[in-house]
Amino acid sequence: MPRTSARVPVPRDVWVMVAAAFVIAVGFGLVSPVLPQLATSFGVGATAASVIVSAFALARLTLAPAAGSLVDRLGERPVYVTGLLLVAASSAACAFAPDYWTLLAVRGLGGIGSTMFTISASGLIVRLAPPDARGRVSGLYASSFLLGSITGPVLGGLLAGFGLRVPFLAYAAALVVAAAVVHLLLGRGGTARTTARARRRRCCSPRRWGSPRTGPPSARTSPTGGRPSASAWRSCRSSSRPHSAPAPRRRASRSRSSPSARPRRSPSRDA
């Protein structure tokens, strides 16, 4: 009966992204029920209120390629944090918008920040997830976002009782918290080290391959027994170790006391 490989643990940085996705989704759900009502409070009709919602999506669609190029130049984490702070500033400006056109402009600005952190999050999830756990990581990330999307509108309806502008302030505060969490915790957990350790445990565990003290499995081991050959054992151990730059070679210096190190004297012409 073939033995199954060990389950790869989810890195700490992935859990940071999952928590941030939940907070972002909750905040977005806070403003969803009250945004059309806030737009109609400026004396516009239902069509103009719908344009407020479409402006956010239009800004995301238009600037998605530019956001991808920005991620390639600056990296995922700076663009992610900047996008979150931009949407937070846009949401706070919505709470203090004096008229319809100001609300439309700041919602478009929020769409720019939204596409920045959305594309950055996609790149981060792919880069941080171990190859053998990418499906599980994608499921965790999507589940946290959907759970926040379910919880947010309920909380937004409750906050709307205190005023139509209160959910926007709560959304801005949630985004600031998410940006702080990602900035302070992401990249501090040693993702590469965790992935290498998991790969080493999966490939070179003593249960499957033999103990390092006893060496690789013998050549007499049957291929059908679930224990590969000695050459595969050595290649797995070498591939699971982190790559490091080779140490510079030092030239062997001869000792001064050695006869070969002493300079040879040329024979005298007088002799």
Image (spheres, helix red, strand yellow):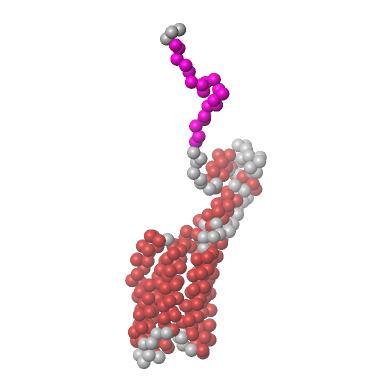
Q: Is residue 264 on the magenta stretch?
A: yes
Q: Tell me if residue 11 can be seen.
A: no
Residue 97 screen position, x and y as percent: 40, 85
For the point 62% across and 48% down, the residue is: 205
Residue 194 screen position, x and y as percent: 56, 55
Number of numbered discs visible in the structure rendering: 0
Quadrant where the C terminus lies? Answer: top left
Residue 225 screen position, x and y as percent: 62, 45
Q: Is residue 49 above or below residue 219?
A: below
Q: Is residue 78 above or below residue 204?
A: below
- Name the chief secondary structure element in magenta: loop
Q: Is residue 33 above or below residue 21?
A: below
Q: Tell me if residue 187 can be seen.
A: yes
User: Quadrant of the rendered structure where residue 233 is?
Assistant: top right
Residues 25 and 258: in front is 258
Q: Is residue 128 on the magenta stretch?
A: no
Residues 165 and 202: in front is 165
Q: Which residue is most to the bottom?
A: 43
Residue 52 screen position, x and y as percent: 37, 82
For the point 39% across and 74% down, the residue is: 111
For the point 53% across and 82% down, the residue is: 155
The residue segment tinted magenta is: 249-268
For the point 60% across and 54% down, the residue is: 6
